[in-house]
Every structure is written in C-alpha cells, then in structure tokens.
Amino acid sequence: MRILPSAVRTALTTAITLVGLTASSLPAQTASQDDLNALREQIRQLDQKLRILERSQEIKDETAAADAKKQAKVTFTDKGLTFASGDGANYLKLHGLVQADSRSFFGGKNGPNNNDAFLIRRARLIFEGGFAKNYEYLIVPEFGGASGNGTLTLLDAYINVNLKPEFQVRAGRFREPVGLEQLQSDAVAFFAERSLVSQFVPNRDIGVQLWGDLLDGTLGYAIGAFDGVPDGTSNASNTDINNEKNYAARLFAQPFKNNKDSALAGLGFGVAGSIGKENNNAGALTSGYKTDGQQTWFAYNAATVANGSVSRVSPQAFYYNGPFGLLTEYVLSSVEVRNGATKRQLQNDAWQIAAGYVLTGEDAGYKGVTPATNFSLVDGTWGAFEVVARVASASIDKGAFTGAAAVADLTKSAEEATAYGVGLNWYLSKTVRASFDYFNTDFKLPASAALAGTPVVAHQENAFVARLQLSF
Amino acid sequence: MKLKSLLSLLAAVALTGTALAKDIELLNVSYDPTRELYVDYNAAFAKYWQAKTGDTVTVKQSHGGSGKQARSVIDGLQADVVTLALAADVDALYENAKLLPKDWQKRLPNNSAPYTSTIVFLVRKGNPQNIKDWDDLVKSGVTIVTPNPKTSGGARWNYLAAWGYALKKYGGDDKAKEFVGKLYKNVPVLDSGARGATTTFVQRGIGDVAISWENEAYLAVKEFGADKFEIVVPSVSILAEPTVSVVDKVVKKKGTEAVAKAYLDYLYSDAGQEIAARNFYRPRNAGILAKYSANFAKLDLFTIDDVFGGWTKAQKTHFADGGIFDEIYLKK
C-alpha cells in the first residue's frame, strides 16, 4: 500500500491526535454531550479525509502501474536486445554471432598444408520476433564463412505459426529435421566444427514443416516437404533444381525430461530420415565431404549425376547429466548415381560419439553451458572450462570406386575417413567462448585410387582449430 | 512419397492430435463481482460436461471492471466467452475488433442476459446518515462510494439508475443532469471496478453509502456480517442486464466453439439458474425466481431501453469521451 506523503500524513495525524487529546482532556463536568459529539464528528471527518487521500493515492498508483504495463519495453541483456509491446505479444529480439577462427595444419608430408588461415567462420545478425504471440519469425543474414568475401548470404528466413506447442507450422528456409548435431546451434556444440556425420545429412533447405512437442514436451515430432539439398549443404539457389521434392521427418523422445530428479532426465533419443528423388542432376550431389579441418576427402567425378532415389536414415541420441554430456548419431545416406554407363546405388554411412565434461561443475546441455562466473582478473573468477572428445568415422560405398567410369573422383577421394578430436572450451562469460580443438583424421584409400597432385587424403590430417566466439 | 500422401499424413497427425485432446480449457472474461458466481458455476458445468462427453473442462476466470475487461479482449486476451456487465461492452468487441457478429445478442434467450440484477445502497449498520432513497445521496456531507463509469459496467448502471430516478421525479434531462452532478460531488474517489469499490467501502471504511449491484451488496453483508452493514433498497432503480457471448474468433481458432456455446447455454438451465439465484443474481426462470423471492426486494424497475433508448445511445450520450459524465465529473 502506497503511503501518503509524510508531511500530509503527519499533519492529518497530528490534527486528529490534537482533537482527540483535546476531547479527552476536557473535564467531564465542563464538556457537554454536544461538545463531545461535535469533536467525535470532527475526528470522523478527518479520519475519512485521511482514508480518502490514501485510497486516491493507491488508485493513482494502480493506474500508473497498469499504464506502465502497456508501455513498450526495451531490454538489453546477455541474450540480446529486445523490443516488446507492453503485453509481450509483439516483440523483436536482436542477437548476434561472431566466430573468429585460426586454422592450422601440421604433420603431413606432401599434403596441402597451405590452408593455414585466420578466418571469420561465422558472422551473423539474428532477427527473431513474433506478432500476436502466435506468429513467429527468424531472419539470419550471414556475413562470414563462404560469404566472408563481401557477399551476403541469407541463412535462415522462416515464419512459424505457433498455434500451440503441439501443433506448429514453419515455412521458409531452415534446417531440415534430420541430423542431431546439425540441428544443434553452431554456437553451443562440443567442437568448433561439426563431425563427419553432419556431412551426410541435409543442412538448410526451403520448404514447409509441421512440428511440435507432444506429451508434455517429452516427444518431439517434425515432418516436412523441401526442395531437396545434397548431403551437408544448404539450398543456395533459392529455388529447386527440379520438380521433385524431398520429404523429411523426425521423432525424438525425452521421456524423463519432466522428472528433474531422475538420472535419466537428460536422456533423449530418436530417429530421423529423409527421402526424395533426383533426375540427372549434378547439383543434387555433394560437392565434397569435408574433414574436421574443412578439407575435401571425397568428391564425385565431375561427370557424375544423381539419378534416382535419395534417402537418409539417422538414429540419434544424447545424454546429459550434470557436467557430463554425450551425443551420438549414425547416418546412412543412400543415393542413386550415374557416370555415363556406370550406374550405382551407393550406401554411404557415418557415425560419431562425442562427449564433454564441464570441469568447473556447471550443467552441460544440448543448448550449451552457462558459466556460473565470468572470467575476471579483478574478481579472481575464471568462467567455466569444458573438456571434450570425439570419435567419428565415415565410409563411402565401395561401388563408388569401381566400374568403367567410376562415379567417385579417384584423384582425391578416400573410401573411409576416421577422425579423433579432443578440445577445451573456455566459457569466459555467457556470451564469449574460446575453444581449442585438435583433430586427427586417417584415410583409407580405395584399391582403384589414382591420386593426383597433393590431395588431402594422401596423408593423415592433423588440424588445430582455435576460436574466439561472441554469441548473444 | 507423393505430395498427396504427405498431405494425408499431415492431416492424420493433426486429426489424431485433436482426437486425443480430452482436456479442454476455457477462459471466461467477466466483470468484477461475478467471481463467486462463476466459481460455483464452473464446477457445476465441468461436472455436467464430463458426464455428457467424458471430457475434462477447466474454466479459467478473469475479472475486472467490465469496460477494462472488454478492452483486454479487444487487445488480444484469448477469451472463449465474455460474461460482462452490460451489452455495450460486448458490442465493443464487434465494433473494435469484429471478434463476434453484430447480432450476437440475438443468439441466446433474453437478449443474451441469463440473469439480471439491480442497483441498491449498502450502508453502515444503523444507517447513520438515514439514507432511504436517491435524494438522500445528494445531501451535503454524505460521502458516496461508486466506481468509475469509464472502466466499470456496474458504475454505469449506478449512474443511469440515478439519472432515471431524477428524470422520473424531477422531469427533464437538465434536472437529471443537475441531480447526478450533485451526486458525484459527494463521490471523493472512483475505483476502477465494482469489487474495488466494495473493498473501499467495506474494508477501508470510506464513505457513508456505496451504490452497488444488488448481488454485490448481499455478498458484502454475507461476508462481513449483518451486524456491520445494511442494504437499503431505493424506491426506483434500473433493471441491470449483464450479457454473455461466445467470442467467435477465439473459439474458432482454439477449436472450443462447441464447449463454449454449451457453457453459456447451461446458464439458462435449471441448474445454472439455481446457481445464479444462490449468488444473489435474479434468475430469468420464473419458478426459480419465486423460490428465491425472499432475496430480491420488489421495487419499481425501469429498463435502459425504456429510459435511455438502449445501450448504444446511452453509451454515446453519457460515457463516451466528452460525454455528460465527463462534463459532470471534470466540473467537480
């Protein structure tokens, strides 16, 4: 309850007290009943005035508080800049992501160790918003990565109609619901670079998706139709390369999610897949599967085209418990290809197991680590540290390397790649992370290999990737 | 998979989700003094609906000044049904946001007013200011509590009841305006809703008389004791008709149209009418009204249509910005 200004309150209280004292101090024999009644009435009136003033002030405060709720709000936190209408139904959040990398290769003999570089891996402005609570959108332009040469790429641009958590429709350009690691935000993954597995699932594509979380959020589903993109790549043309569509679906369960005390609360598992068809399209094939150091270890022959069905299936799981986290997935990617008279149905597959442990005790999670303290020399605090390790392997169908005209590019392709990675993540604050990753990749060459020049696959790849990242 | 197959699958997923939805939630956006009424009514309806369909329905309540509540729904509050103090506030949902059809009032019996009430006076025990009728309210030294007609439906009924009395007794709008002007000179503070005004009078001890909904006055006496308060029934008052409606746009979006409609229909059932009567609202059902007649004083009641030509006209003349109430209260 808002109290009256003290001066007013004191004056009124004093007046009431004086009147009261006067009344009580009057000798009974000299004060007539009329005098007492008059004084009582005077006290009553003053008391009423005081109560009315207090209530008026309360109503003014209530009105001011209600009006304040209607005012638009601007907040700036470590999660970004937010503009929101008074009722929160309409909002715009501005986020950002910058990753400054150093990539170094060493230990190879004749390999192309000329890729050592400083680079801007990602530089994004993220516009996230909504109208009338139910209508959400995300627009993400990319200034870094491949577009770091001055061009700009539209990374995400979609509208999400959030009718209820169980039933949502998303349309536009966004990640296809297939790869577990691919669906995880770039900024919070264990390693600076995704594993070999993510090269075998589609990345961002244009389409429409029905999705939601059922059973109190313990079962997520997504099913959608897309233009279709090759393994590990995004739709770069803003159109389809043919009339055929790709269909993707995913089911992911976290059955103990709502039982926070359970050791299995952080367990999630599921299966995802996609299916589609391509007709004589070179553009429907990956331009190359890449190592952790982002060098190509397998490529199709330039004359090879996709010609038939394309599908992927991926069982996947994660487990987080306190500072420990584990993520694993497998993907089988099938594609029908043709190089002249050579036709093949290739069954390529990959798997990975990645784990992390937060040394400073904070919880690990699919959405990242939040440090309990910031790194500060003044305060003597160090933020959070996490050690991570990963094993991943990928193999190409042997059929890719045989036939009159092999569908693989025999001059620079391996049949298998096995990568080991270890790393240290230092969370300097909720928004700044430094990571230091070492990757070692072994290659197994096909019998028909005809390496030319100084291909990546000629020797092991030893790569060191350091990153300083700002994410808010 | 062909697109047709995919669409069929999408439809199947959507339908399955709908079919499994056995728990239904409704939001009833109502005015200030109906809290107790709808607590009772919602429980009865949930029981009725579960017996009829097997579904569990939970009705959430939102209360405040009727005008303010209407504004909230216009601004996006997802009300499945509104049960407001007067038709003008429901009309506003059509006029400002087309949330329901223009002829919403014809969809239910009795112009969509399943119960009525009237305006009476709540005074302190012993009636120290000897208030018996409207004329006693304009006397010098009498302090009146009534809410703000700009935000409260009950306050508008209070205002119009006083106006109608003066019109009948003194004749002519000028005389009525003068009378109501004098009355508001005795109002030191305007709460935003009827429940707030009751609290101001009953718990804060402000004022000699509260102009109040009949049901609210009875509730105050029941809650705080007949040894503290009395009800004074004036010679003339207004027949207050709180109105109800489904909010079409919201229920279509949420898929709650059938249950929302049933919720309002049930207000007209014998069970619904009994609950209204038990909460001191005058039921439309003559038999049930007779059963509870001891609760409802007989007095001369006029309607808003008879004296003011309906809510649309009354709203525009008296309560719109720059209307007569503004003239009266700003002058004060």
Image (spheres, coloured by chain):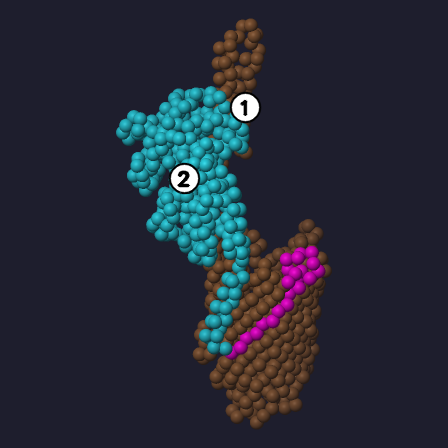
Chain colours: A brown, B cyan
Residue type indicated by callout 2: Ala
A259 within the magenta span: yes
Q: Of all residues shown, which one is farthest toward the bottom?
A: A404
> Please, which chain is the residue tagged with disc 2 on?
B
Same chain letter for marks 1 and 2: no
Residue type indicated by callout 1: Thr
Q: Is residue A355 left or right of residue B95?
A: right
Q: Is residue B120 left or right of residue A428?
A: left
Give the residue displayed 36% in from the left and 45% down from the top: B111
Magenta residues (range): A255-276
| B184 w.r.t. A456: above or below | above
| A215 w.r.t. A249: above or below | above
| B26 w.r.t. A118: above or below | above
> Please, which chain is the residue tagged with disc 1 on?
A
Give the residue displayed 71% in from the left and 60% down from the top: A263
| B111 w.r.t. A275: above or below | above
Q: Which residue position is annotated with label 1?
A: A10
Q: Is residue A368 left or right of residue B195?
A: right
Q: Secondary structure at mark 1?
A: helix
Q: Which residue position is annotated with label 2?
A: B286
Q: Nearer the viewer, mark 1 or mark 2?
A: 2
Quarter of the N terminus of chain A within the rendering: top right
Give the residue displayed 54% in from the left and 30% down from the top: B224
